[in-house]
Amino acid sequence: MVKFDEKNQVDSVNGALALRPEIESIVDRYLTAGIRNLCWLGIGGTWASCLQVVCHMKESTDMDVFAANAAEYCATGDLRIGEGTLVVISSVTGTTAEVVDAVKLVRQRGAKVLGFIDKPDSELAGLVDECISYKSNEQLKFFMTADYILYRQGRFQDYAAYYAQLEAHLAQDLVEIEKQTDSFAEEFARKHMNDALHYFVGAGCLYGATYSYAMCYWEEMHWIRTKSIHSAEFFHGMLEVVDLETPITVFVGEDSQRDLGLRVAKFLPRVCKNYTVIDTRDYPLEGIDGVYRGRLCHLVLHAVTNRIDAHLEALSGHDMTIRRYYRKVDY
C-alpha cells in the first residue's frame, strides 16, 4: 500500500486517546468554575472540525454550544462570547493569523481558551489559558473533550465503557478500514483525478468532513475544483445541475442525520451514472458496540478518504504539500 505506515497510525491514535486524563483534568477545572456556553473556534479545516463536534453535541445538551469562524468573529464579533465562555481551538502551526487575532479578542472579553496546539512554543500556545500539544487527530481530541463535558452533565453515562472500547480497539480498527478500502480508493482516484469539478455531499457529523475534504484536501492539496453541499440542501438547488455525467460523491454516516444522506443516495440513480456513495456502515469496527458507531462515523470516513488521497497523490505525481499561494504570498 502506498503512503501507509500502520505502526505510526496506530501509535498516533493511541497517543491521542492517552490524552484523556489531561483533558478531563482541564475540563473539570472549567466546569467547577462555571461555564455558561461553549464555543468551538477555527478557520479552514479547523472550522470544519468545529462544525462536526457542534453537530455531535447539540442533540445531547441544552448548553449553548456553537462554532465560530475566526475571521468572521474578528470582523463581526459575537455577544455570546465573554465571561463564562469556554473557547476551544486547534492549530497545527500555532501561527494562523485569524485564530491568533480571534483568541486575543475573546480573551479581552473574558472568555477562557483551551488550545490543542501542535507546537507548544508557538505564538498561539502562549495566548491560550490551557495548551495541550499533540500532533494530528484533531477531530478525536475535539470529540474527547465534548464527550467528557457531556458525561459531566449527565448526558453520556456510557462514557467510561465507550472509551475503554476505543482504547482497546479504535486504532487498529481504523488501519483495518484503510486496508479494506485500498482497492476501491485506487479505483476511485483513477476515475476522478481529472475531473473538472467534483461535488461532495454529506450531512450530520459528516458535513464538516465533507466541507473539509472538498476544500482542504481536493482543492488545497490536490488542486481539483470541488463544491461541498449539505445533503439537506441538495434538493434546493444542486439537483437541477445534475446530469448523467456529473461527478458526485455522497458521504453517508450513521448519526441522526443518516436519512438525509440516504435520500440523496436513493435519488441519484434516477438522474446520474457518475455518482459514488461512501457509507460508513460498510466498514466494521471490531470490538466497538454498534450503538456507538454514530459517534465514530467521521473517523471511519477519514480512514477511507486517507486512502483516496494517497492514490490521488501517487497517480497524479502532485505532492500534497505543495502550495502556490497559501503562506507563500501576502493576502
Image (tube, rainbow, N blue to C red):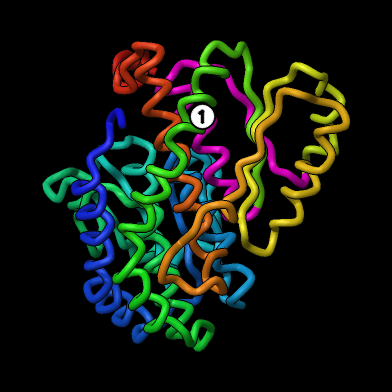
Q: Is residue 202 visible?
A: yes
Q: For the point 42% across and 65% down, which residue is it?
A: 286
250 or 326, nearer to the observer: 250
77 or 179, nearer to the observer: 179
Quarter holding residue 76: top right
253 or 90, nearer to the observer: 253
323 in relation to 282, above or below = above
Q: For the point 68% across and 36% down, which residue is it?
A: 229
Left of 172 or right of it: where is 212? Answer: right
Left of 29 or right of it: where is 37? Answer: right
Q: Secondary structure at mark 1?
A: helix
**Label 1: how many residues lie within 10 Å, few (<14), some (14-19) or many (20+)?**
many
Quarter holding residue 321: top left
Q: Is residue 107 visible?
A: no
Q: Which residues are magenta?
A: 204-232
Quarter holding residue 234: top right
* Position of the N terminus by quadrant: top left
Which residue is denoted by mark 1 in the rendering? 215
Q: For the point 17% across and 46% down, which residue is it?
A: 119
Percent position (x, y) of residue 55?
Answer: 59, 60
Left of 92 or right of it: where is 201? Answer: right
Percent position (x, y) of residue 223?
Answer: 46, 16
Percent position (x, y) of residue 29?
Answer: 29, 81
> Looking at the picture, which amino acid does disc 1 mark?
Met
* Position of the C terminus by quadrant: top left
Percent position (x, y) of residue 323?
Answer: 33, 16
209 in relation to 60, above or below = above
